[in-house]
Structure formats: C-alpha cells, structure tokens
Amino acid sequence: MIRDLILKNRSYRRFYQEVPVKLETLKELVDLARLSASAANRQPLKYILSCEPEKNALIFPCLRWAGYIKDWRGPAEGERPSAYIIVLGDTKISPSFLCDHGIAAQSILLGATERGLGGCILAAVNRTKLRKVLNIPPHYEILLVLALGKPKEKVALETVGPSGDIKYWRDKDEVHHVPKRALSDIIIG
Ligand SMILES: Cc1cc2nc3c(=O)[nH]c(=O)nc-3n(C[C@H](O)[C@H](O)[C@H](O)COP(=O)(O)O)c2cc1C
C-alpha cells in the first residue's frame, strides 16, 4: 500500500482550480506533519494555510514552476493550485531545520494523495516577495511552499536511459515524464 501511495504521489503542476480544498483538510494534512519525525524533537516548523482565491492569488506569482520545461511559465489561470501550505522554520525555536521540512512535506503530500488530491513541493520561491505580500515576520524562515489541488495532469515514471539524463519532460499529449535512476544504480554497497 505504501508503494502504491508513493507511486501515485507525483509532483503535479496543473490542477482543476475550480475544485476547492477545504481549510479543514489543510489542517488535517498539517496534523500529519505535526506527528512526523523532527530532529531532537524540537518541532520548529510553523505553517501558513491558504485555500481562498484571493490569498492564493498573492502566493502564485512568488513561485517558479518546472525549471527544466523552458517554454512553460507555470499553470495557466484555471489550472492553478486551489490551496497552499507554506512551511516556515521558527528561528526562535531553532536556528536550523535540518530535513524536518522535507519529512513534513512528504507526510503532507502522502496525506493529500490518500485523499485524492495532489501537489508539488516548491523551493524555487521568491521569498522576499512572499514575505512581503503575506506579512511574514522576520523570525520565520520561508522553507517550502506546497501547492495542492485536484491534479489535472498525467505523470509517467520511467527509468533513466544510458545518457544519464534526469531532466523531466513533457510530450505532445502533455504527459509529464519523470526519469528515475534504477535501483541497481543507487545501491552502491
Ligand atoms: C526540495 C524540493 C524542491 C522542489 N522545488 C520545486 C520547485 O521549486 N518548482 C517545481 O516545479 N518543482 C519543484 N520540486 C519538484 C521536483 O521537480 C520533483 O520532485 C521531481 O521532478 C521528481 O518528480 P516527482 O516528484 O513526480 O517524483 C521540488 C522537489 C523537492 C523535493
């Protein structure tokens, strides 16, 4: 089951924008992160939730989508995320966050996948702009933005070919292809 969930939990970048994600759902997803591992159990992560069109519209211009797909500037109006979870690190609790935010992001996205939703982790964020538009106090480090919604795209996993190219790409039918390294190439001892 966990393998099925992980296979389904792809990075989705186009959504049915008209399908809302409830605030209650976002809270349930953050609760999964709350229950996840944290270095030294310091639990320094804090979250900002957004599921209203007006707030979403402030967040969207701060994000950079799919860097390898050069002729695409991100989802068009109508295909944008219905919700976001912004993952912050509270520097009053800890000066560093190690991989807490990665673990939190995965817990949240697996929970979203289980609920028929999908999303994308975004680290390519204009943090100065996001801090300004949402009035995020300076003692919170902006770590990740998680985009969420009902996925509107097909993602196909494939094995990295002999060229070793790991860049994801999109075919003429807009299927998003993601090369993954073979198991035999990553277990080195
Ligand atoms: C830490 C991290 C940061 C990422 N940042 C971005 C980003 O800024 N923009 C984006 O479109 N995708 C981003 N992604 C998504 C990756 O591109 C994606 O995970 C990768 O292409 C593999 O696809 P998959 O998640 O479907 O396996 C990020 C993923 C991770 C784990």
Image (cartoon, helix red, strand yellow):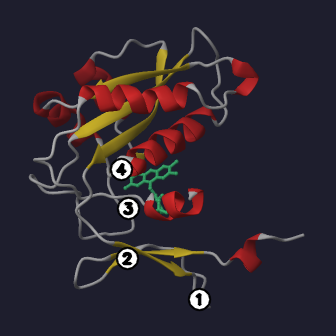
Q: Residue furthest bottom?
A: 162
Query: Neighbour class for label 4 at 10 Å: few (<14), some, many (≥20)?
Result: many
- Which amino acid is tagged 2? Trp
Q: Which mark is residue 67?
A: 3
Q: Could you say whether the residue bearing mark 2 is in a helix, strand or loop?
A: strand
Residue at image x 47%, y 17%?
140
Marks 3, 4: nearer the viewer: 4
Q: Is mark 3 within 8 Å of ligand 1?
A: yes
Query: Where does label 1 land, which residue?
Result: 163
- Which amino acid is tagged 4? Gly
Q: Earlier in the sequence, mark 3 or mark 1?
A: 3
Ligand 1 location (quadrant): bottom left
Camera-side residue: 140 or 178?
178
Whole-number angstrom distance, CA of label 1 to CA of label 4? 29 Å
Q: Residue furthest top?
A: 92
The answer to whether the residue labelled 2 contacts the one labelled 4, judged by CB atoms less than 8 Å apart, is no
Query: Neighbour class for label 3 at 10 Å: few (<14), some, many (≥20)?
Result: few
Query: Where does label 4 land, which residue?
Result: 119
Camera-side residue: 76 or 12?
12
Q: Residue 13 vs residue 44: left or right?
A: left
